[in-house]
Amino acid sequence: MIEIHNLYKSFGSQMILNNLNLTVRRGETKAIIGRSGVGKSVLLKNIVGLIKPDSGSIKINGVEVTDLKEKEYNKLRMEIGMVFQGGALFDSMSVGENVAFVLNEFMNLDKKTVLDRVADSLALVGLKDVEQLMPAQLSGGMKKRVSLARVLCMEPQIILYDEPTSEVDPITAAAINHLIIDLRDKLKVTSIVVTHDMNSAYQVADSIAMFYRGQVIADGKPDDIRNSKHPVVQQFITGEAQGPITEDENLIFGHVK
Ligand SMILES: Nc1ncnc2c1ncn2[C@@H]1O[C@H](COP(=O)(O)OP(=O)(O)O)[C@@H](O)[C@H]1O
Ligand SMILES: [Mg+2]
């Protein structure tokens, strides 16, 4: 469903994606793990066309998307929902307006259908009667759920989640994990879940890919990753630092958050 070949992306002298290859099968949930600054969000933005790669190929449903015109990309974006790291809600719009935004802007639906779809997608993320609230009135976890509802109301085939369980309490995190699994099982959604949270990765993913220095250094079933002998993979999943962060890593990763 998503095929990425020989992808390169740099910002100035900083090489972020350095010959990256990744395949996500239809109906699969692929987790992407890796240190802060390694380029996980940059990859997702390449897939939805918010960032153009320097070179390489991204095929979605067999279609090469790196050279699509903006108008064609907009059509494709209806099929790909992206849940941004911080939620990316419009602060001046109510929750209902936020969730309905894409439906109102790009789809020709009557008012009742829009309101129903908004309520249905909010219900899917466990929220009810919140349409009139403003984003400033929501907790971090609620903002994440609203941004997920905004994606769900487009009924996308592909959902890209950027750290969906970071900055939320463990109960909300568990609910979000369940939802990711449900969307795969019931709606057959194909997903990429970028996460720091190994529990979440093991729970939701059919396969896990680890990014390091611009490349995928391991890709396999959760158990394969758990049992990987690769020292960088082990270090990441066990959270055990092998010495301080080197000057070299600082340069490669740009900055360490
Ligand atoms: N639009 C941009 N312009 C310049 N540098 C960027 C841009 N987006 C990301 N970067 C840099 O690319 C690197 C990878 O960022 P990112 O993909 O956000 O990391 P993460 O793996 O934590 O999601 C970082 O060093 C970041 O500063
Ligand atoms: Mg990120």
Image (cartoon, rainbow, N blue to C red):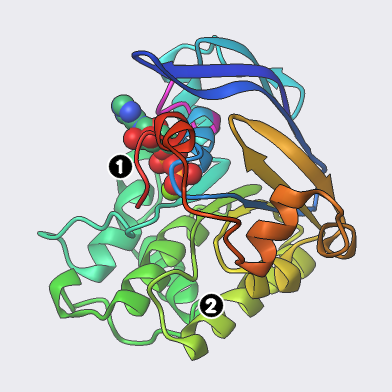
Callout 2, which amino acid? Leu
Image location of residue 196, percent across then percent down: 55, 62
The residue pinned by badge 1 equals 105
Q: Examine the rendered structure and indicate whether residue 254 appears above or below residue 134.
A: above
Query: Are there few (<14), some (14-19), or many (20+) residues within 10 Å of tag 1?
Result: few
Determine the image quadrant of residue 22. Answer: top right
Residue 158 or 225: which is nearer the viewer?
225
Task: Work out which residue is located at the far bottom of the displayed protein and give it.
Answer: 171
The residue pinned by badge 2 equals 124
Callout 1, which amino acid? Glu
**96 left or right, relative to 203:** left
Image location of residue 75, percent across then percent down: 50, 29
Residue at 70%, 49% (x, y): give it: 232
Q: Secondary structure at mark 2?
A: helix
Magenta segment: 47-52
Query: Are there few (<14), some (14-19), or many (20+) residues within 10 Å of tag 2?
Result: some
The secondary structure making up most of the magenta span is: loop
User: Could you tell me if residue 30 is visible in this image?
Assistant: no
Between marks 2 and 1 in the image, the one whose residue lies nearer the viewer? 2
Label 2 within 8 A of ligand 2 by Cβ? no
Image location of residue 10, percent across then percent down: 44, 18
